[in-house]
Amino acid sequence: MSHPKTPAHVAIIMDGNGRWAKKRLLPRAEGHRQGVEALNRIVGAAARLGIERLTVFAFSSENWARPAPEVAMLMKLFAQALHRWSEPLANAGVRLRVIGDRTAFSDSVKAAIEANERATANGTNMELVIAANYGGRWDVCQATQQVIDAGLDVTPENLSKYLTVSDVDLLIRTGGECRISNFLLWQSAYAEIYFTERLWPDFDAKDLEDALAWYVRRERRFGRTSEQVQNGADLSL
Ligand code: IPE
Ligand code: IPE
Ligand code: MG
């Protein structure tokens, strides 16, 4: 059972893998490997807590600028996780979807994405959205282009229909940085934003519960006054 105020859509900027490894004198790759394990745990916890959609930032459009061996390692981990998680996600009723510009991926990564999306397509418990080669600016541009191609007016309502994912309720960033790094720019317009020092490989179910408890205490006003909210005003955007 989910709490009445459980955020329907939680998004996470999974940051701090490199620093986690450095602190332990390990290669950055080990931090990324542990980061994959952390995500595995958090997906289970999120589904148990009644979150409907979990969107995670796995690889930004800017991350291509990292050293080539690190990029190659991240791509390998991504494809491996997609293969490894296909069956457990399907069994748990979690539907996986990848957002971002896929054209840049190798054929094997593209195939791994498609195979996982196909295997998990019928899941109804939770949607896991993985942002890979994703950029918030790219998302707004591709949606705008689709609106134009459909002969529609460029309005917030029409744009929202063509964006890759819905508005975010709670945005979490681990690793201590207080920035958005070109993640869900449009969709975070009214998100509650939770920054934590915890490095992503250390983030666990208790940390997610802490973030949800913090979220429950927020008063979301969407431009209204506190009095209006308390009197039950319509909060639609
Ligand atoms: C996040 O961890 C993972 C990706 C960006 C792929 P980082 O690799 O950015 O870790 P730090 O910020 O260097 O600690
Ligand atoms: C954001 O983290 C991208 C992901 C978590 C995938 P970065 O580590 O790339 O962000 P910056 O460069 O510190 O802003
Ligand atoms: Mg980082």
Image (cartoon, rainbow, N blue to C red):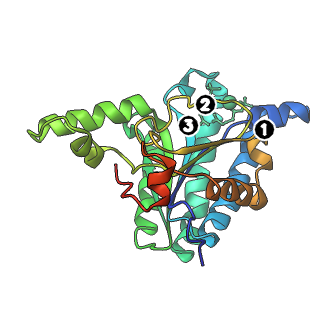
Mark 2: give few (<14), some (14-19) or many (20+) Cα within 10 Å.
Answer: some
In the displayed structure, 41 sits above or below 132; it is below
Is the CB of the residue bearing disc 3 within 8 angstroms of ligand 2? yes
Q: Which mark is residue 227?
A: none
Q: Amino acid at mark 1?
A: Glu
The front one of 220 and 64 is 220
Q: Is residue 159 left or right of residue 106?
A: left
Badge 3 is on which residue? 59
Element type at mark 2: helix
Q: Amino acid at mark 2?
A: Val
User: Label 3, label 1: how many angstroms apart (C-alpha)?
Assistant: 20 Å
**Residue 192 screen position, x and y as percent:** 56, 45
Is the CB of the residue bearing disc 1 within 8 angstroms of ligand 1? no
User: Label 2, label 1: how many angstroms apart (C-alpha)?
Assistant: 25 Å
Sequence-wise first label, 2 or 1: 2
**Residue 142 screen position, x and y as percent:** 29, 35
User: Label 2, label 3: how many angstroms apart (C-alpha)?
Assistant: 9 Å
Q: Residue drawn 36% across and 58% down?
A: 234
Q: Residue furthest left?
A: 151
Disc 2 vs disc 3: which is toward the camera? 3
